[in-house]
Image (spheres, grey):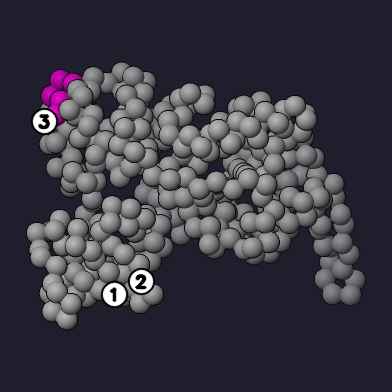
């Protein structure tokens, strides 16, 4: 199930335009960049592909951009696919056998790979061989094909759903963290330059504060604020334009969207502040469990609005304060 909202064709093209093309254009994640530079430089000196890389963390933090930067730095081609797109063993076999020496295979949403497909990856990653079974029953035969040297870069928002055998075959595993507001402002500066937008410093700060510490969100909000400024103003994004556009989008100063508020309200009003299980929370908010788990919950936990306990999710004092309520004392109902 795809938890990412559908994008307009224009937005997809803009996303490609805004994607960093060089290391110095990729803001944030310094430790990961430093480690990847060493990994790439060492592989170049050995004249070998870099080791398999696993990137994980909440959506929108730059996993795909890192994969493309690695391919650019290695001066090689990148083949992009996703876990749900590889439905059968034959699909993966077709992709692997069509790779050229040194190519990079980028698999997004790797946690959604079919288990049979995943098992084919083990020998492919470890010994660069592909085992194909022809026929069924006693007459079945196994054919082993040699694969060209390649690198698998996998990205996932839920590393816990990857099997141990698959995780252990990656030579480098990196977690991408949420960005700082300062880094988000730098990303907005670069984006406004590329898009030819006039953006006041006050407006830039407001958009950054509402961007959930996530580059993808910051660029999405910038494009929507730009639209508002072009329709209702001169195209110049002022503080007033940013505030008006974000109000229309129902995004508050902390970046909370209607669904975030619906989740917080459900925990506090319907479940007395929690604890509440994921299934019950999904039913109460009419949202998919996976959407809550991957899209909304990481940010709400990051800003300290909800906590996970062995019995379920609970709302914190900060969440109560944000919606204008006092947190009840223990044993007191909301």
Q: Nearer the viewer, mark 3 or mark 2?
A: 2
Say which residue label 2 marks: 309
Residue placed most toward the observer, 285 or 37:
37
Mark pair 1, 2: CA separation: 7 Å
For the point 28% across and 62% down, the residue is 306
Quick one: label 1, few (<14), some, or many (20+) residues within 10 Å? some
User: Which of the marked residues, 3 or 2, is nearer the chain's N terminus?
Assistant: 3
Residue 268 relative to residue 78: left or right = left
Query: In the structure shown, which secondary structural element does the residue marked by tag 2 occupy?
Result: strand
Where, by quadrant of the figure, is residue 49 drawn? top right
Quarter of the figure that contains the C terminus: bottom left
For the point 69% across and 53% down, the residue is 169
Mark pair 3, 1: CA separation: 40 Å
For the point 78% across and 39% down, the residue is 149
Residue placed most toward the observer, 12 or 61:
61
Residue 68 shows up from this direction:
no
The answer to whether marks 1 and 2 mark residues whose Cβ atoms lie closer than 8 Å is: yes
Residue 125 shows up from this direction:
yes
Query: In the structure shown, which secondary structural element does the residue marked by tag 3 occupy?
Result: helix
Image height check: is 93 above or below 227?
below
Mark pair 3, 2: CA separation: 41 Å
Say which residue label 3 marks: 240
State the extent of the magenta-drawn residues as a range: 233-240
Residue 175 relative to residue 274: left or right = right
Q: Residue 39 location in percent, x, y?
A: 65, 35
Residue sticking out furthest to the bottom: 331
Q: Reply yes or no: does residue 62 show up in magenta.
A: no
Q: Reply yes or no: does residue 236 show up in magenta.
A: yes
Say which residue label 1 marks: 275
Q: Residue 331 location in percent, x, y?
A: 17, 81
Could you tell me what secondary structure mostly forms the magenta stretch? loop
Residue 213 relative to residue 127: left or right = left
């Amino acid at each position: 199930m795809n938890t990412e909202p559908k994008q307009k064709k224009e937005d997809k093209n803009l996303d490609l335009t805004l994607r960093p093309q060089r290391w110095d254009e990729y803001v944030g994640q310094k430790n990961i960049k430093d480690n990847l530079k060493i990994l790439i430089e060492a592989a170049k000196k050995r004249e070998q592909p870099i080791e398999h890389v696993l990137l994980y963390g909440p959506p929108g933090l730059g996993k795909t951009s890192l994969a493309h930067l690695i391919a650019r730095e290695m001066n090689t081609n990148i083949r992009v696919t996703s876990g749900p797109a590889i439905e059968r063993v034959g699909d993966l076999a077709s992709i692997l056998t069509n790779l050229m020496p040194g190519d990079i295979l980028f698999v997004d949403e790797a946690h959604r790979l079919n288990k049979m497909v995943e098992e084919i990856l083990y020998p492919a990653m470890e010994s660069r061989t592909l085992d194909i079974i022809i026929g069924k029953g006693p007459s079945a035969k196994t054919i082993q094909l040699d694969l060209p040297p390649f690198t698998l870069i996998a990205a996932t928002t839920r590393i816990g759903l990857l099997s141990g055998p698959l995780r252990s075959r990656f030579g480098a595993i990196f977690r991408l963290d949420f960005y700082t507001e300062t880094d988000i402002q730098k990303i907005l500066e670069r984006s406004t330059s590329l898009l030819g937008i006039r953006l006041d410093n006050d407006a830039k700060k407001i958009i950054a504060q509402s961007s959930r510490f996530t580059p993808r969100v910051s660029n999405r909000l910038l494009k929507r604020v730009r639209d508002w400024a072009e329709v209702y103003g001169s195209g110049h994004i002022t503080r007033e334009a940013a505030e008006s556009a974000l109000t229309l989008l129902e995004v508050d100063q902390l970046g909370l969207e209607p669904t975030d508020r619906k989740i917080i309200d459900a925990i506090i009003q319907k479940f007395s502040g929690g604890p509440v299980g994921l299934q019950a929370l999904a039913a109460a908010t009419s949202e998919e469990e996976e959407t809550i788990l991957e899209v909304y919950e990481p940010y709400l936990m990051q800003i300290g609005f909800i906590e996970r306990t062995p019995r379920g999710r609970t709302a914190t004092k900060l969440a109560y304060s944000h919606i204008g309520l006092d947190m009840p004392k223990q044993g007191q109902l909301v």
